[in-house]
Image (cartoon, rainbow, N blue to C red):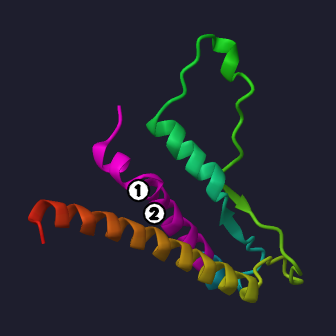
Amino acid sequence: MSNPLSDFLGVHATALPLREQRMQLIASNLSNADTPHYKAKDLNFQAALENAAAASAPLQSTDARHLNGLNLPPQIYERAGVQPSLDGNTVDADVERAAYGRAALEYRASLSFIESKVRGMLTAITGQ
């Protein structure tokens, strides 16, 4: 069953919470930059988006064997460090700050698209 609001907003309705989750993971990495044995985590955005799309619109098949090979990668994974520290921490603050900046830009782009769609809907409703 489809959601009319999600249909109207397109992929951005699904992407926005996933982008927020990724930003939280990156912020967590930055806050644990000095924690011994902490492994940097990231979100496989493409896999998470595919899983969310599959959950909202389950695949249909004519034979049970059609989906046997479907094996999506895990959404959250440990990112290998460029230069791990001696205490086993794999967080590189420069890499994390760059990743956070890009994630924030992507989040804002999705948010701007949603704002534009809602503004267009309000214009259609009010006629102004």
At label 2, counting other C-alpha atoms closer than 10 Å, the crowd grade (few under 14, some 14-19, many 20 or more) is some
| Type of amino acid at the residue the image marks with label 1 | Ala
Residue 73 percent coordinates (x, y): 72, 45
Residue 18 in magenta? yes
Residue at the top extreme of this rendering: 63
The image's mark for residue 16 is 2
Q: Please identify the quadrant where the C terminus is shown.
A: bottom left
Q: Along the line of sight, which residue is nearer the eye, 69 or 3?
A: 3
Report if the CB atoms under discs 2 and 1 are less than 8 Å apart.
yes
Q: Secondary structure at mark 2?
A: helix
Residue 125 vertical position relative to residue 37 in the rendered view, above or below: above
Q: Is residue 75 left or right of residue 2?
A: right
Which residue sits at x=55%, y=79%? 105
Q: Along the line of sight, which residue is nearer the eye, 5 or 122?
A: 122
| Type of amino acid at the residue the image marks with label 2 | Leu
For the stretch drawn in magenta, the main secondary structure is: helix
Asked if one can make out residue 69 in the rendered structure from this viewpoint, the answer is yes
Residue 114 vertical position relative to residue 35 in the rendered view, above or below: above
Give the magenta range.
Answer: 1-27
Q: What's the CA distance linking mark 2 and mark 1?
A: 6 Å
Which residue sits at x=74%, y=89%? 94
Asked if one can make out residue 32 in the rendered structure from this viewpoint, the answer is no
